[in-house]
Image (cartoon, helix red, strand yellow):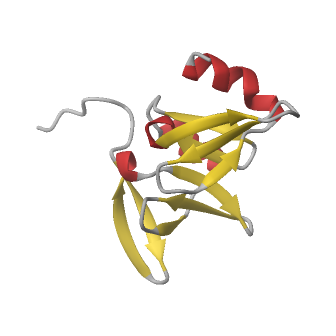
Amino acid sequence: MEVATSSYLEKIKGKIENQVYLVKIGKIQRFYIENRKVLAETASQTYNIDLRLYQVLEMLPTTFIQISQSEIININSISHLKLTPNGLVEIFLKNESFTYSSRRYLKTIKEKLEL
């Protein structure tokens, strides 16, 4: 009998067109909503996820943090941060993309990243 070591997912089903892939959670840099679809982005691919964002968040390990109503990022994928004059945090990812946290999630982000 196989024993699960944690309640978190190790892989998630992602689709590209009509093909389904099992994507390792650790390889995903961010989950975000675009055109009412939840997408998972790795360094090289973007997958469609057939779940709502809050459902994804419940299954993720603590290395993921919600930074806005429509985005969750893997803190292991952060390259660096930049505080903007208007109080937002610009978050640069290792895959050269960047995103912004919303002010509503700022306190959580600062606590999680010990800023």
Q: In the figure, residue 7 lies in which quadrant?
A: top left
Total marks shown come to: 0
Image point 46% across, 32% down: which residue? 63
User: Relative to residue 98, is residue 19 depicted above or below?
Assistant: below
- Percent x, y for residue 64? 51, 36
Tell me, yes or no, if residue 17 can be seen here.
yes
Of the 4 image quadrants, the one containing the C terminus is top right
Looking at the image, residue 4 sits to the left or right of residue 76; the answer is left
Report the front residue among 12 and 62. 62
- Percent x, y for residue 87? 83, 30
Report the front residue among 103 and 83. 83
Looking at the image, residue 44 sits to the left or right of residue 114; the answer is left
Q: In the figure, residue 91 lies in which quadrant?
A: top right
Which residue reaches farthest bottom?
18
Image point 44% across, 65% down: which residue? 14
User: Relative to residue 59, is residue 11 depicted above or below?
Assistant: below
User: Relative to residue 92, is residue 47 depicted above or below?
Assistant: below
Looking at the image, residue 34 sits to the left or right of residue 27; the answer is right
Which residue reaches farthest right?
86
Image point 50% across, 35% down: which residue? 75
Tell me, yes or no, if residue 52 can be seen here.
no
Q: In the figure, residue 110 lies in which quadrant?
A: top right
- Percent x, y for residue 79? 50, 41
